[in-house]
Image (spheres, grey):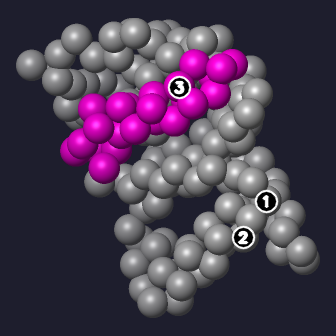
Amino acid sequence: MSVGLESLVPADSYLEEAFLRWVLTPAADAGIVQRVHSQYPVTVQERTYRLDYLIAGETLQLAIELDGFAFHSDRAAFTYDRLRQNDLAATGLTVLRFSYDAVRTDTARCVAQLQAMLRLDPLLALSVTARPMGARCVPLNLRGTRCR
């Protein structure tokens, strides 16, 4: 597994740190760090959005959006999230969304999904880890995992 990318890439929340530790670190090696931009601003017409992460490749601009249930659980948030994603897509960004529950309980699938997207770009593909997880690892907290 790669060096813990959570120590190399800024995180503004627990969910962002969890993504860096449990998804990005197993998915890619440290060479990807120069391509990962946290809280990246994107302006669409008069609206400015901050992406949790932009992963900038040669041909792919990947917007990573992390959704905790507390901030995305009512009708207004649901509607806003769809309009926001449509605005981001209209700029040419490819949006990849992960919920906290997915990062926490279906980690291997999140890693596989991220790797599948990274492989679509010739530059980002160079950072994809060949064997992301040798065992099924379950995140216990931000300080460690339990592997079976």
Query: Which residue is at 81% across, 54% downward?
Result: 41
Whether residue 96 sits left or right of residue 60 in the image: it is left
Query: Which residue is at 65% across, 20% downward?
Result: 122
The residue that label 1 is drawn on is 91
- Are discs 2 and 3 less than 8 Å apart at CB? no
- Residue 119: assigned label: 3
Q: Residues within 10 Å of mark 1 (few under 14, many from 20)?
A: few
In the foreground, 59 or 12: 59
Quadrant in the picture for residue 37: top right
Whether residue 51 sits left or right of residue 42 in the image: it is left
Magenta segment's dominant SS is helix
Mark 2 secondary-structure assignment: helix
Q: Name the quarter where the N terminus is drawn.
A: top left
Q: Is residue 141 visible?
A: no
- Residue 87: assigned label: 2
Sooner in the amino-acid sequence: mark 2 or mark 3: 2
Sooner in the amino-acid sequence: mark 1 or mark 3: 1
- Are discs 2 and 1 less than 8 Å apart at CB? yes
